[in-house]
Image (tube, rainbow, N blue to C red):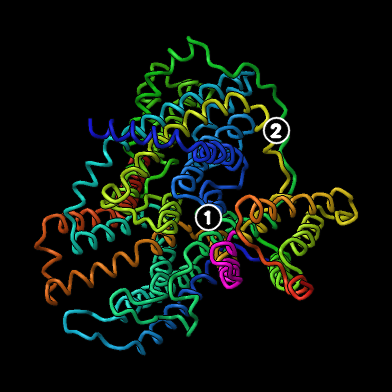
Amino acid sequence: MVLNEKKASSLIGLLAIVGGIAAIITARSFPPSLTDTDVGPSIFPTTYGVVLVILGLLLVVRNLRRPLAPHATDKGDSAPLDVARLAFGIAGVAAYLWVIDYAGFAISTVIYLWGMIGLMRGKGGFRQFSTLALAVLIGLAVYAAFVLLLQVPLPAGLWLESAA
Amino acid sequence: MDSLLALLDGARHLISQWDAMLMAAAGVALGLIVGALPGLSVAMGVAIMLPFTYGMEPLHGLLLLSGIFFGGVYGGSITAILLRIPGTPAAAATALDGYAMTRQGKAGQALGVATVSSFTGGVISILVLIFLAPLLAQFALRFSAAESFALAVFGLSIIASISGGSVLKGLVSGFAGLLLATVGMDPLLGLPRFTGGMSELYSVPFIPIMIGLFAAAEAFKMLSESSRATELKTAIGRVLPTRDTLRNVWGTVLRSSGIGTAIGIIPGAGSDIAAFVAYGEAKRFSKTPETFGKGAVQGVAAAEAGANGCTGGAMLPMLTLGIPGDAVTAIMLGALTLQGIQPGPRLFQENGELVFSLFAGLLLCYVVLLVMAFCSLRYIARMVQVPKSILMPLIMVLSVAGAYAIGNSMFDVGIMLVAGVIGFLMIKAGLPASPMVLGLVLGPMAESNFRRALTLSEGSYDFLYTRPITVVLLTVALLTMFAPAFSTYRRQRQAKRSTAIQSGAQA
């Protein structure tokens, strides 16, 4: 399955419609203004929601009426995308975030970097020594930059915390 | 005169803080690399480095980000000249003649002229910023809630002009930003809106969204691209421009710097527009316009002076009015608020020393850029050939660490990831991210000031048409909003008319 400019545009249009409707419905439960001189907390979100629904509809309708153009004239990245590869990329980051909670930032970052560099290098990428070396070097450099240089704490991980 | 004395005081304050000067140099170095790396935008570089500034003194953090901004705008020209790959949109104008010069064996001359022109354009724009900013801030001090609302509307009106190919897509992006900006506490009543009971959402997670939109989204995009880097096949040669070359381009550089600064002050008109307008004007003024596009050194000078002239200009409305002109200055606005500093007219009264130290630092950034560029051009040209297989995971790791560092919270990292996926979809759909950023920044300003003005006028809407500054700002906003639609209509009408004339002549 590929995601081209037209499909992505329609998807964004649908998201705008759903987001707009959700905002309008939720804003109805906001309490009214306490004074006669204020429009209250719901008027701005409702207005934005209504405009977003209209714009989303226009975007979807315009895409439906337009033939598929492989080389679209707008600034969109018209090259089709392999959705499976993107899903893998997002799942990779999600897994990375999940592992951070347990293994901490340093270890999980090295694992993530090794996986991603290996994947992007293609066939045999995981087996190259330089992939692992780069993962360790970059991971430690980022960790050192934040924790040692800038003194910004990064997650130590549940395993390390329980061991301590 | 007051500005000059304040600038000298600021410079004295800056010299006493060597680590702040070091940050400026580090920022320029990072900016040079970010700008030169094709696919990495200046906005992305600034967004990624924003969390690093959290624990820093305001001056240090702002100089780091400004250095990235300036270095990034210039850095785009390196790959544009050597490889015909513009590192930034503005560098596309530089590539027109820069790459032609490289093919003629004059790569060093093109790089040298680009460097000197960038430096001159940047310094002139900073000087304009230094002397104009206090005057504008003084004027803006008269603004009450009604004028501030009109100012926010004016800032938002540029959405149409920064929408790129499609105004509709720009509006979707802008209104999504405005809606997102309503998440959190109501500005007048203090009631939570759209928070779902989560205290993390009591204020809009602005910085994780920025990191997601500009950095993580770009990393996801890289996943779908080839990881092969373009090989540098040319010898660079002498970089330092000769006296003859400088004599040949100085008029173009000065004119283009002025054009760039003026365009930079207009919210919404970024360095890419400045570079192309300056290039067009240089061609118009040239005695040999036929050489443009075929390796004219004035073409490189005009594009670079114009693009860098924009930098100081773009910071003017951001610092004095709190209105960002583009995505980069919007992120820098976020950096100021992260440090507890409110940009706007009062900034000069409340943080005068900081502002003028920053101005001195901005001038220093350009001096550092000049020296660093001449010393390291050859190395940067090779460094930018980093494969995407390393860049993509590195950007993602920095995004995760940066989003976490802001509030030590994995919730922010999750927000960054969601924003990254949406940002990626936006890239694929051709939706620009800048309008969303503008909506996020200016939405709260518009809402709170509108409601405050309404309360002050006891529920009457007459503040919209009885206050002169408000009326002027709202009128300009309306004109700005409909200008792109009007020019499209005129273009279509002209095209129809010329087709009709042609078919009439054929008949």
Q: Is residue B353 left or right of residue B387?
A: left
Instruction: Note whether B7 is above or below B457 in the view shown.
Output: above
Figure quadrant of residue B124: top left
Which numbered dot is residue B382? 2
Instruction: Note whether B379 is above or below B471 in the view shown.
Output: above
Dot 2: chain letter: B
Dot 1: chain letter: B
Residue at 84% across, 50% down? A133
* Pointer 1 residue: B55
- Do discs 1 and 2 share a chain? yes
Residue lying furthest left in this view?
A: B466
Task: List x then y, in percent, for residue B390.
Answer: 73, 50
Q: Quadrant of the N terminus of chain A?
A: bottom right
Task: List x then y, in percent, for residue B120.
Answer: 42, 26
Kindly identify the amino acid type of the residue bearing the numbered disc 2: Arg
Task: List x then y, in percent, for residue B308.
Answer: 44, 35
Q: Is residue B281 left or right of residue B134?
A: right
Q: Is residue B404 magenta?
A: yes
Magenta segment, which residues? B402-418
Figure quadrant of residue B150: bottom left
Q: For mark 2, give the secondary structure.
A: helix
Q: For mark 1, give the secondary structure.
A: loop
Residue B185 in view, yes or no: yes
Residue B91 in view, yes or no: no
Figure quadrant of residue B88: top right
3D distance between C-alphas at marks 1 and 2? 33 Å
Q: Is residue A95 magenta?
A: no
Task: List x then y, in percent, for residue A119.
Answer: 80, 58
Residue at 42% across, 17% down? B288
Q: Quadrant of the C terminus of chain A?
A: bottom right
